[in-house]
Amino acid sequence: MTTPADNTPYGVILDAYLDAGLLQTGDDPSSEQIATGMRRLRDLINVEQTQGLKLWVNVDTAVPLVAAQATYTLAPGGDVDMTKPLRVLQAYYADDNTPANRRPLIAMSWNEYLNLGQVAQQGAINSYFVNKQAASLIVTFWPTPSTEAATGTAHLLLQVQITNPTTLTETMQFPTEWRMFLHWGLAAEVCTGQPQSVIQRCEQKAALYRRALEDWDVEDAATLFQPDPRSGYNNGQMSFR
């Protein structure tokens, strides 16, 4: 059985220039084309991380709690030492004495966090607030963990960053099914100045493969809607989040 080809930056860049009509079959990209392709490939990867759910970059991350400490920084050298994650998708609290016992934590918006009446109140945490900064995510739990609450651990389901490639021959952190989108997406980025038919083809192919991936990259379990415990009845109807 043949092993699928690795997702290397060089292979994606070569195919992108071929599809954009900037190279002929058998030609090698110039050093300038490689440099431009690598730069724009990184840009494409970084932008795509803001679009939709990428299941393979979701990581359950433990946050050890400290009594009387409400706020924790997720960043290099922070309370959780890691590359800044992109976002917190959801969270739960686990009892360290009985790890099987856990309960979900509720996400708070800026408005909800700022309207808290007693920010310093200590107790069993039930909510969390995420302050997104340029170089870190700052997560505040509420109520502030009490001594008893600090015997457990908060867990955050994080969407983490995909490491940008730095060499032409390394395997990128993408499943093989992403390769078609990556090279057509890059082709759409580098085809400026080409005939309109080529530009249109590259853009259409990139959009086609991106839609296919977004339809594929979803959880297998059904999505369920549950009442938000913070919402009340409005005109006889329950509000949902």
Image: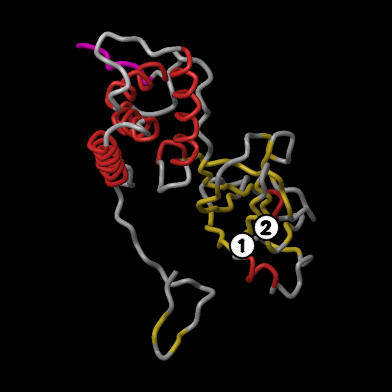
Question: Mark 1 and mark 2 in contact (Cβ < 8 Å)?
Answer: yes
**Mark 1, secondary structure of its residue:** strand
Q: Which residue is mark 2?
A: 141
Q: Which residue is mark 1?
A: 127
Q: Position of residue 76 (x, y in %)?
A: 70, 34
Q: Position of residue 197 (x, y in %)?
A: 22, 37
Rounded to the nearest whole Å, what is the CA distance between mark 2 and mark 1? Answer: 6 Å
Q: In terms of sequence position, does the residue under pointer 2 or pointer 1 come before the other?
A: 1
Label disc, if present, on residue 50 of the rendered structure: none
Give the answer, above or below, for where 148 lies relative to 115.
above
Instruction: Please give the name of the residue rendered at 35% of the width and 10% of the height, measured from the top-left corner.
Output: 28
Q: Which sits in the foreground, 53 or 99?
A: 53
Let me know if residue 65 is in the magenta part: no
Question: Residue 105 lies in what quarter of the image?
Answer: bottom right
Instruction: Please give the name of the residue rendered at 28% of the width and 45% of the height, measured from the top-left corner.
Output: 211
Instruction: Please give the name of the residue rendered at 49% of the width and 82% of the height, measured from the top-left corner.
Output: 232
Q: Main secondary structure of the magenta part?
A: loop
Q: Quadrant of the N terminus?
A: top left
Magenta segment boundaries in residue numbering: 1-7
Q: Residues within 10 Å of mark 2 (few under 14, many from 20)?
A: many
| Badge 2 amino acid | Phe
Q: Which sits in the foreground, 157 or 153?
A: 157
Apparent side of residue 69 relative to residue 226 in the rendered image (left or right)? right
**Mark 2, secondary structure of its residue:** strand
